[in-house]
Amino acid sequence: MTDKLDKEVAGEYNTFRTYLLLLRVGSASARRVQEQLGFSSPSLALHHLEKLRAYGLVDKDSYGEYTPVRRSFGILRLFVITGRWIIPRTVFTMVIFAVLTVGFLRYLSEHAYFAVAAALSIAGFIWSLYETVRSYRILPK
């Protein structure tokens, strides 16, 4: 099923954008999806919503509102989805390197080894920051 999700949803640009929108806003109607994503008609938004529903990625209530079911597939495996936030996993590495950098810089005057450790921590922080920005740019708007 995951391979099919990767191909039919993550590989389909507008369907994936629809899923990401629902993850970010919580729930939406076909009209709201059409307006938010700039689709030509609500029926096109409905097509993508129903496709997501067929794969079990959204639920539909009696008022026509679609609510996402949180699943990691395709590129979303590289992210942590919490509430309405979609956070690249590299953010956590960036935070660890930032804390290490601050700690090593604090004790820099006590021993020369702390300078090497601080330099490596700074390099790790910069790399993690770069990867985090790249991850955000991969996601469709």
Image (cartoon, rainbow, N blue to C red):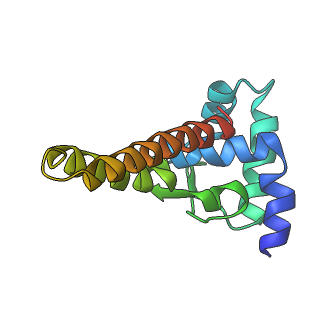
Q: Quadrant of the N terminus?
A: bottom right
Locate residue 110 relative to residue 105 in the image: left or right: left
The foreground one among 137 and 54 is: 137
Q: Position of residue 68 (x, y in %)?
A: 57, 56
Look at the image and tell me whether residue 8 can be seen.
yes
Look at the image and tell me whether residue 84 can be seen.
no
Q: Where is residue 96 in the image (x, y as percent from the top left)?
A: 34, 56
Locate residue 109 relative to residue 68 in the image: left or right: left
> In this view, which residue lies farthest toward the front?
112
Q: Quadrant of the C terminus?
A: top right
Q: Residue at x 42, y 50 (%)?
A: 120
Question: Is the residue 92 above or below the residue 38 in the image?
Answer: below
> In this view, which residue lies farthest toward the bottom?
1
Q: Position of residue 119 (x, y in %)?
A: 38, 44
Q: Where is residue 31 in the image (x, y as percent from the top left)?
A: 65, 32
The foreground one among 99 and 61 is: 99
The foreground one among 18 and 121 is: 121
The foreground one among 104 and 96 is: 104
Q: Residue at x 78, y 39 (%)?
A: 14
Q: Residue at x 80, y 41 (%)?
A: 13
Tally of numbered discs: 0
